[in-house]
Amino acid sequence: MITSSLISERAAALVEEFELFDDWVDKYQHVIDLGKTLDPIDEAFRTDTFKIQGCQSQVWLQPCSENGLVFFKADSDAQITKGLIAILLRVLNYSVPAEIVRSDLSFLEQLQLKEHLSPTRKNGLNAMIRQIQLYAAAMEANAPLI
Amino acid sequence: MSTHLHSPSLRLEKVRGDFPALHQSVNGRPLVYLDNAATAQKPEAVIEAVSSYYRTDNSNVHRGVHTLSQRATDAFEAARANIARYIGASSPKEVIFTRGTTEAINLVAFCFGGTRFKKGDEVIVSEMEHHSNIVPWQMACERSGAVLRVIPVTDSGELQMEAFRALLSERTKLVAVTHISNSLGTINPVEEIISAAHEHGVPVLLDGAQALPHCSIDVTALDVDFYCFSSHKMFGPTGFGVLFGKEHWLEQLPPYQGGGDMIKVVDFAGTTYNDLPHKFEAGTPHIAGAIGLSAAMDYVSGVGFEFIANQEKDLLLYATGRLKAIDGLVIVGNAKHKAAVVSFNLGSAHPYDVGTILDKFGIGVRTGHHCTQPLMKRLGIPGTVRASFSFYNSRAEIDQLELAVRKAAAMLL
């Protein structure tokens, strides 16, 4: 990590946490368990407007802001996808928009979960990252979020 | 020695040796390839036929006067004759080369639908069709004002034949159904469908993409009007496929695409089209594809359908039994006549999660709606995990599958 922003600090902590696992089964179990810790989205947001179309799993993303910080609630019908979302949001949530827009997500490679981020993986995760950064960019420009 | 070669396990070992891609590790485990309904692996004989063509005979076909062009043309047309013989066509003229099943269906939808569908006419498809046997007909209906009628499917994944008969009428212009369901493995009663349609004077198109690798096909005995299939599911190269059409139909249809090879004389005053089968093959064809598919058919003939049928029947029974025993696992599609395909769901787990975990175990399956969204909607599920077998799969691989599915259940349920 180049900067010592909050985002990179959180990412470093997550990488350290994942170093505990030397077996992929345990690592994936941890991803799945992290998904279960996600705050549920407000039911009003479980609509097509807030759905991110992956090929196979569905993801809903609810943008929120508080005191100039941006955060997201999200859900997915697939547990591994949901766990990956939880990982992303743990790093990105409650940041100033500019930081999210320019965030370095290379920590995902260090978690060795990069395979899920290849553009051909049909899990909607790439689309979700793009959407998170679009929302943050809109906030940075003071445009309405919804 | 000869008695040994007749032992099924030795034959299986020998057959597996013919497929180089089967012998590798994935995620640190020996590959278990169970995505054969999506595409089959290629035997050495096919790889060799394709690479030998490029190494020694490569040239453009037809029209050329030089030796290589003649050799390529001979090999290409010999492939067509071999493919025609293999499927029981009465003449190579009835074998049109396409990019695959999808293009073959689109060709008929465009050429047949374009000239013969009128407002108020009806085209019958079924609820279990692959999108490639739905969308081309929807498009043809949009262009002509014809209407798409749909044969419903039972809970176990079979066609409702009474409903099919009731749909047939003087308005019906064509029936287009799949021979074997790609999602569920259901083998449809195609002889019955063809004879019922013919009683009404209605031609039938069969999507044979899933049938060719599993059973011997005789289009003449079937009396089918159009039969479409892909090379890559039949152990041949990708990007190549066949439309079989009865000669009298193909003669009546207008060309599909315009270009080189499909013409006799081009003049601004008017162009004369070429004879069958070239009328439907504009541009330089996939020469290596034809040669590769022909080699694949020779290879499958060598393995023999007796071995293939026995092996696949055993794999289907064994896999069904082993998977059924897993708590929470539900098999989707329980037709009486099934090809070696087991589609399933594991409790409330998303197929994507199951497929991801199986991949970590080196097991390749397909997950999702399998390009049959209307069927998934009918069955009330978002998708399935599909393990599809080929004659080169083994019981030991199914044991690996069972173990991995149990592990996935422990993680996800």
Image (cartoon, coloured by chain):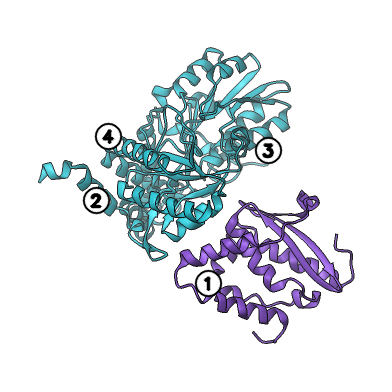
Q: Quadrant of residue A123?
A: bottom right
Nearer the observer: mark 2 or 3; the answer is 2
Which chain letter matches label 3? B
- In the rendering, at what x and y percent does residue B325 appear? 40, 41
In the rendering, which numbered label is found on residue B225? none
Q: Is residue A77 left or right of residue B38?
A: right
Which chain letter matches label 4? B
Is there CB contact under 8 Å for labels 2 and 3? Answer: no
SS at mark 4 in the image: helix
In front: B219, or B152? B152
In front: B76, or B126? B126
Separation (CA) of disc 4 from disc 3? 57 Å
Inspect the image, locate mark 1, and give the three-letter code of the amino acid beneath it.
Answer: Gln
Task: Name the residue tied to disc 3.
Answer: B269
Q: Tell me the shade of chain A.
A: purple
Point 55% across, 65% down: residue: A30
Badges 3 and 1, same chain:
no
Task: Name the residue tied to disc 1.
Answer: A112
Inspect the image, locate mark 4, and give the three-letter code of the amino acid beneath it.
Answer: Glu
Q: Is residue B31 visible?
A: yes
SS at mark 3 in the image: loop
Nearer the observer: mark 1 or 2; the answer is 1
- In the rendering, at what x and y percent does residue A130 appear? 72, 65
In the rendering, which numbered label is found on residue B306? 4
Is there CB contact under 8 Å for labels 2 and 4? Answer: no
Is there CB contact under 8 Å for labels 3 and 1? Answer: no
Which chain letter matches label 2? B
